[in-house]
Image: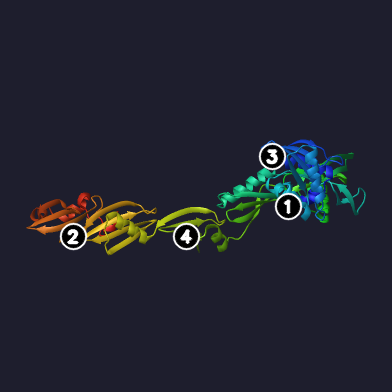
């Protein structure tokens, strides 16, 4: 049974009251007067728009899907607006407007809420839904009879073991545990199963004949509640019903076993159990909670004990991803999207719902070379580069020097240095020192081992030591220099200086 099925099962007066109590407040309308009936003069409800202060004439039409709101109904609203001095008109119906009525409503700017929009409002805004009082068929077994009979009874309400707010929080927490970032609630529906309330009488012999009475409730899943659990007649979610003849027989057997084990004392004999059907209600056995998460629709099923029993997720496809983000879709370990932003590239990492969980920007190599060339004001032909995450290190070789620049993911130079090339100097060991960001050259001159520190400005430091002295102390200048961080050779490739 859907939302519209429930609303159309109400009487005209009940539906008017439902619209006044629950629907209009969601629209920001405060009810002044409910004047429905044959003498309403075109307005069932007079309301005030709390935002703009305008007076609104509301006409309520509880129609079946086959019956449409007519042009005459719209003219009645226009008449009611004049009679009740209203600024605006509004039609709320469980059906829809026919063609002429729709044209007239648009011509005079009469607002309307048709059945589809009304059902969507109830689901999305969690507007309380009045449970139907309609007569339903139920299975009963009369006292003293061994046969079940079907007769019509009125429902006594719904038992809610787990509130809808708690169920939504359980579902939301479950989605968060699965990596969802921003689940947006779309609506809630509940599967209602039968709750059978029995008045039981147990008689037995224990010395003498004794009897005791109790009221117990058994739901369609076999759970027993002592007494009658709290029942309500309005819910704020879409409902579906599930009934089965076998459920009733099973509930009776469970009730008899429960009474026998809990009420009848041990050692009793000649036990007789009589059950009377005391009430017939429903229990919210399972919630289906709909979310929009990223690019897909998700339904989380939560049972009456607050346990997630199932999650249904829409399929994430290349077309969905491409339609939402554009760019190049890359599938591997999950989804990634590469977005070309001219000189930069942005990569989006998506979770299983199509939400962006990480963003990484990168500068294009060609643009990094262009930025470095402009930065140094040179245009060398001998260029190489090396990517480091989203940044690019560029080496432009010109006039015996390496012009080194690090261009970050935003296309900005964040580090640079110019060092001479090692090949233009003679020495038995050459390389680059990270701390000084300079070339270290080791040579032997006139019996001395020489260490020179060379930058773009030339030799800026020099150390000398006699080779004979080094032999006497059982070492070498090379060994001493290695131990000295100040003159160590850390890198062979100058790109590693930035």
Left or right: 110 as drawn, with respect to 352: right
Neighbours of disc 4 within 10 Å: few (<14), some (14-19), many (20+)? some
| Residue 396 spot, x, y in % from top left | 27, 60
Q: CA distance from mark 4 to mark 3?
A: 44 Å
Tag 2 or tag 1, which sits nearer the N-term? Answer: 1
Q: Which residue is mark 2?
A: 429
**Label 1 close to label 4 by CB (< 8 Å):** no
Tell me, for residue 28, which label it has, or none: 3
N-term mark: 2 or 4: 4
Q: Earlier in the sequence, mark 2 or mark 3?
A: 3
Find out whether the residues at labels 1 and 2 contact each other: C-beta distance under 8 Å: no
Identified at 25% across, 61% down, the residue is 397
198 or 60, which is in the foreground?
A: 60
Which numbered disc covers residue 454? none
Visible in this render: residue 2? no
Alpha-carbon distance for marks 1 and 4?
A: 40 Å
SS type, badge 4: strand
Asked whether, in this view, residue 405 is left or right of residue 117, the answer is: left
Mark 3: which secondary structure? loop
Q: Secondary structure at mark 1?
A: helix
């Amino acid at each position: 049974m859907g939302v519209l099925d429930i609303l159309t099962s109400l009487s005209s007066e009940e539906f008017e009251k439902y619209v006044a109590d629950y629907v209009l407040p969601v629209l920001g309308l405060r009810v002044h007067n409910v004047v429905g009936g044959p003498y309403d003069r075109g307005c069932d409800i007079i309301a005030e728009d709390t935002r703009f202060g305008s007076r609104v004439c509301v006409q309520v039409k509880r129609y079946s899907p086959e019956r449409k709101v007519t042009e005459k109904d719209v003219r009645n609203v226009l008449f009611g607006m004049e009679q009740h001095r209203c600024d605006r008109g509004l039609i709320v119906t469980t059906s829809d407007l026919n063609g002429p009525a729709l044209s007239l409503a648009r011509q005079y700017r009469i607002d309307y809420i048709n059945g589809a929009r009304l059902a969507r409002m109830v689901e999305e805004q969690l507007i309380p839904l009045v449970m139907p009082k309609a007569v339903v068929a139920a299975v009963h077994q009369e006292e003293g009879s061994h046969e079940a009979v079907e007769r019509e009874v009125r429902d006594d309400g719904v038992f809610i073991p787990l509130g809808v707010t708690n169920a939504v929080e359980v579902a939301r927490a479950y989605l968060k545990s699965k990596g969802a970032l921003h689940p947006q609630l779309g609506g809630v529906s509940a599967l209602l199963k039968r709750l059978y309330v029995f008045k039981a009488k147990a008689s037995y012999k224990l010395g003498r004949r004794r009897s005791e009475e109790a009221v117990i409730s058994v739901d369609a899943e076999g759970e027993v509640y002592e007494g009658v659990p709290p029942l309500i007649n309005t819910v704020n979610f879409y409902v579906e019903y599930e009934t089965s003849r076998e459920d009733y027989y099973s509930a009776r057997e469970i009730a008899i076993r429960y009474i026998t084990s809990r009420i009848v004392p041990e050692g009793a004999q000649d036990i007789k159990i009589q059950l009377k059907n005391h009430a017939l209600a429903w229990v919210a056995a399972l919630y289906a909670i709909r979310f929009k998460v990223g690019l897909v629709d998700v339904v989380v099923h939560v049972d009456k004990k607050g346990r997630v029993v199932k999650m249904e997720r829409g399929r994430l496809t290349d077309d969905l991803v491409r339609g939402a983000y554009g760019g190049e879709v890359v599938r591997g370990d999950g989804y990634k999207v590469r977005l070309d932003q001219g000189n930069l590239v942005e990569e989006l990492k998506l979770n299983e719902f199509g939400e962006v969980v990480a963003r990484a920007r990168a500068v294009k190599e060609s643009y990094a070379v262009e930025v470095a060339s402009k930065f140094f004001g040179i245009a060398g032909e001998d260029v190489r580069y090396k990517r480091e995450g989203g940044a690019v290190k560029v080496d432009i070789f010109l006039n015996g020097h390496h012009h080194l620049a690090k261009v970050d993911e935003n296309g900005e130079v964040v580090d640079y240095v110019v060092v001479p090339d090692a090949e233009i100097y003679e020495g038995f060991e050459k390389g680059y020192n990270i701390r000084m960001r300079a070339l270290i050259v080791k040579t032997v001159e006139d019996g001395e081992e020489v260490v020179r520190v060379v930058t773009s400005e030339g030799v800026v430091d020099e150390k000398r030591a006699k080779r004979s002295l080094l032999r006497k102390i059982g070492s070498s200048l090379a060994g001493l220099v290695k131990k000295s961080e100040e003159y160590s050779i850390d890198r062979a490739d100058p790109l590693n200086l930035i």
